[in-house]
Amino acid sequence: MINPLVSLFPSFRRNYYVAKLALIGSEVSEAIEELRHGHAVDETYYPSAPCIDGQGTVVNAFPDEAFKPEGVPSELADVVIRAFDFADEAGIDLASIISEKLTFNATRGQRHGGKEF
């Protein structure tokens, strides 16, 4: 929910949304970093997974990050979660625009605009 003070000033609202979109971009950057660190594109791993102590008891070495999933799939999930949160907060009917974009994109050729990637 947007702070009521932010809603009073158009420039504050714009900057608020810019910051929210930047968070989506940061999740994409984190996914890229996973690949740069050598993780497979479909790999999910748990750096804070439980370990076994000296008595054979399962313990979590990092209880604040209990079993936190990491990897490209996890970061993509964060992208989608943040995008849906953003759309909901901004009053965007994301389902409708996704449908519209899929229909439009089906009319475009592969590599439209000459882009290699």
Image (cartoon, rainbow, N blue to C red):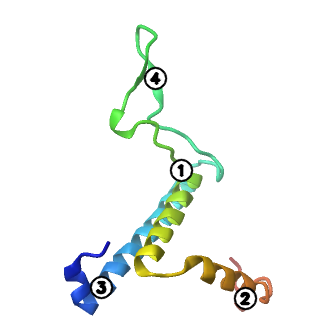
Of callouts 1 and 3, the N-terminal one: 3
Q: Residues within 10 Å of mark 2 (few under 14, many from 20)?
A: few
- Percent from the top left, x then y, of residue 41? 64, 53
Q: Foreground mark, 4 or 1?
A: 4
Local crowd at mark 1 within 10 Å, few (<14), some, or many (≥20)?
A: few
Kindly state the secondary structure of the residue where label 3 is placed: helix
Q: Residue at x 54, y 58 (%)?
A: 77
Name the spot of residue 42 as percent of width and height, x first: 66, 50
In the rendered structure, are the residues bearing label 4 and label 2 in contact, judged by CB atoms less than 8 Å apart? no
Give the Cα distance between marks 2 and 1. 36 Å
- Return the x and y of residue 89 as percentages of the image width and height: 40, 75
* Identity of the residue drawn at 43% across and 66% down: 26
* Within-10-Å neighbours for mark 3: few <14, some 14–19, many 20+: some
Mark whose residue sits in front, 4 or 2: 2
Q: Is residue 6 above or below residue 41?
A: below
- Residue 64 appears in which quarter of the rendering? top left
Mark 3 and mark 4: Cα distance apart in space: 46 Å
Do tag 3 and tag 2 residues touch (Cβ < 8 Å)? no
Q: Pointer 4: residues within 10 angstroms few (<14), some, or many (20+)? A: few
Residue position marked by numbered label 3 in the rendering: 13
**Is 3 on the left-hand or right-hand side of 102?**
left
Q: Amino acid at mark 4?
A: Cys
Image height check: is 1 above or below 66? below
Residue 29 disc label: none
Residue type (three-letter) at the residue carrying disc 3: Arg
The label number, if any, that marks residue 37 in the structure image: 1
Disc 2 versus disc 1: nearer the observer: 2
Query: Reading the chain from its start, which is encountered first: label 3 or label 4?
Result: 3
Residue 87 location in percent, x, y? 47, 76
Residue type at mark 2? Phe
